[in-house]
Image (cartoon, rainbow, N blue to C red):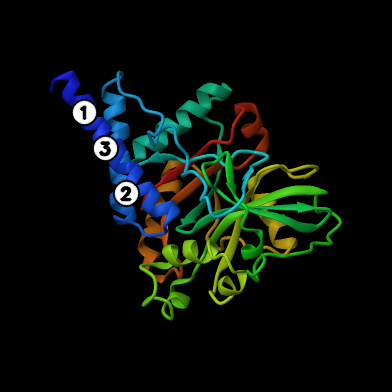
Amino acid sequence: MDKNLIKKKYLQKIKQLQKFNKAYFEKSVPLVSDAKYDEFKKEIINLENRYDFLSHPYSPSVVIGHKPSKNFKKVLHKVPMLSLANAFSVSDLENFEKKIRNYLNIDKYYKIEYSVEPKIDGISASLSYKLGKFSLGLSRGDGQEGEDITKNLETIKDIPLVISKDNFPDEIDIRGEVYIKNSDFEILKNKFANPRNAASGSLRQKNPTETSKIPLRFIAYSFGYKGNLKCNSQSDYLKLLSEWGFITNPLNKTITGIDNLMENYHDIENKRSEIDFDIDGLVYKINKFELQNRLGFVPILLVGL
């Protein structure tokens, strides 16, 4: 295909993706299904991998999320909310682990532990606590800055407003997902297209009283700025979250070995209809923080279901 035609096709896809993003993130009215949206992003990334002359500042390989809404105050995240690398096959998982081993110079006999859990299809949020009090709540936004939705988040019963535990850091950003259970969505399905759409629209209400009428939930799974957090692994951190009063994903597991990762993948896939929230993949994190620190970043992989 002619180089100019390839560029034209690529730019058309970028423009279309921007339309999808605007509808999805700003208006909470998705134009396509999540599966088609992910496939569309994959098509763009595949074109970039195939033709090295293709690049764009709004490519899904560069952009995280979408710019914050103008309806709320914008606030910078102390620590950026990172995107998830995508995997679609066993070979992708194998390559992911191979890169980690090569970078850390560890042999094939060392068992790398992964913390694995289903990714809830909801709205990411970052909760800032100072001296045990919930002080600021932000949406993901574009990963660098988010929307100040503190008042709306305060209406969610799963979010502790005050934490008095001695081992709770003086300052920390607790990160997780705001979502609606499928069973709770039954009373809302005439107003919204799906649970994620309902969660997104509810968090963007100007009046927190209206938000409080929606059965929003929050599951905690990570942190941004962590102050004096004393913890050695993701699995230990999840235990601390529960101790502090947060809900964590009951399907989280610590797993070693690609074969075991795939066995768990198929197990979740078979149970999908029984799970009371929408999921759009499995998130894999290296469990030990020491290895994460040696890598210089937190390697996170999303495997689509």
Circle 1: element type: helix
Amino acid residing under circle 2: Tyr
In the image, is residue 295 above or below residue 260? above
Query: Is there CB contact under 8 Å for labels 3 and 1?
Result: no
Task: Single out the residue that lies furthest toward the right.
Answer: 166
Q: Is residue 264 visible?
A: no
| Mark pair 3, 1: CA separation | 9 Å
Amino acid residing under circle 1: Lys
In the image, is residue 170 above or below residue 268? above
Nearest-to-viewer mark from 2 and 1:
1
Residue assigned mark 1 = 8
| Mark pair 2, 1: CA separation | 20 Å
| Residue in front for this viewpoint, 115 or 127 | 127
The quarter holding residue 219 reads: bottom right
Q: Determine crowd level at label 2: few under 14, some 14-19, many 20+ residues with C-alpha closer than 10 A.
A: some
Residue assigned mark 2 = 37
Q: Residue at position x 58%, y 36% from top?
A: 298
In the image, is residue 205 above or below residue 77? below
Amino acid residing under circle 3: Lys
Query: Is there CB contact under 8 Å for labels 2 and 3?
Result: no
Residue 131: give x, y in percent of width and height.
84, 53
Task: Single out the residue that lies furthest toward the front.
Answer: 70
Residue assigned mark 3 = 13
| Mark pair 2, 3: CA separation | 11 Å
Task: Single out the residue that lies furthest toward the bottom.
Answer: 187
Q: Earlier in the sequence, mark 3 or mark 1?
A: 1
Q: Determine crowd level at label 1: few under 14, some 14-19, many 20+ residues with C-alpha closer than 10 A.
A: few
Q: Earlier in the sequence, mark 2 or mark 1?
A: 1
Residue 201: give x, y in percent of width and height.
47, 64
